[in-house]
Amino acid sequence: MSDAGAEKLSRAERIALRVSVIQTVIAVTGFFIGVIALYAALNEADAVRKQLQASVWPHLRVTDINHGVPGEEKFDIIVSNRGIGPAVVKSVAVTVDGEEKVDWFEVVQTVAGKERFGLSNINIGGAVIAPTEDIVMVSLDSKFATSEITRAFRDLTRSGRANLRICYCSVFDDCWTHDALSGETIETKSCPAHNPASNI
């Protein structure tokens, strides 16, 4: 009787062991399937996020145009959005010889001295620039300034002494800084605060 009971017990133990092994295999298999499913879901979410970011990607650039015949010059600085999403301008800074200026009159005065002149400009700080939009940020016309001042302002901006830096973001708060002097656009975590005294 005892021998038979021992045999039955060992057989029950073997069955329990087999069940335990099967359960372990099923659990491990389920775990790996779950990991693979999670990895696939994260990859898909990342792909969707990148696709959304790309669909609203702005790209600002700065160009200048010299118009007119000698004696009737006009010089414009233009900010354009060549991306596929709106650009939210967070801060703008203009420097001459490394010194920040608060408005375009200060910039032109560095070459005009005490001579009187007029110019037109738009403050783009805080503006939203739509895709394909071109904004004439500043325009100096020899009708309102002498040809010498207009040409001197053009030469100042093209000489490397003056620089314009624009920090802007997409609607998803991905941000970039465009450096007009180098022509480079660099991704940045956030934009510096716009100078409240600036009229650039």
Image: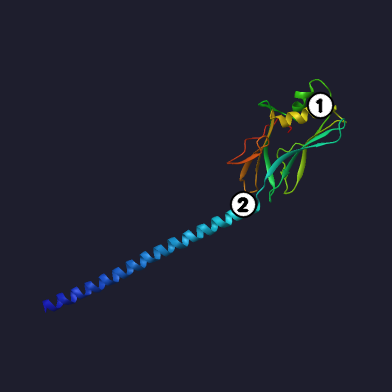
Q: Residue 53: which numbered mark, if any?
A: 2
Q: Is residue 121 visible from the viewing direction of this image?
A: no
Mark 1–mark 2 distance (CA, rounded to whole Å): 44 Å
Q: Give the residue drawn at x 73%, y 43%.
A: 80
Q: Is residue 151 left or right of residue 19?
A: right
For mark 1, give the secondary structure.
helix
Q: Residue furthest front?
A: 70
Q: Is residue 11 left or right of residue 36?
A: left
Vertical arrangement, residue 146 with respect to residue 38, above or below: above
Quarter containing the N terminus: bottom left
Residue type at mark 2 is Gln
Give x and y (percent) for residue 44. Answer: 54, 59
Q: Quadrant of residue 95?
A: top right
Residue type at mark 1 is Ile
Residue under numbered circle 1: 149
Vertical arrangement, residue 122 with respect to residue 156, above or below: below
Q: Quadrant of residue 138?
A: top right
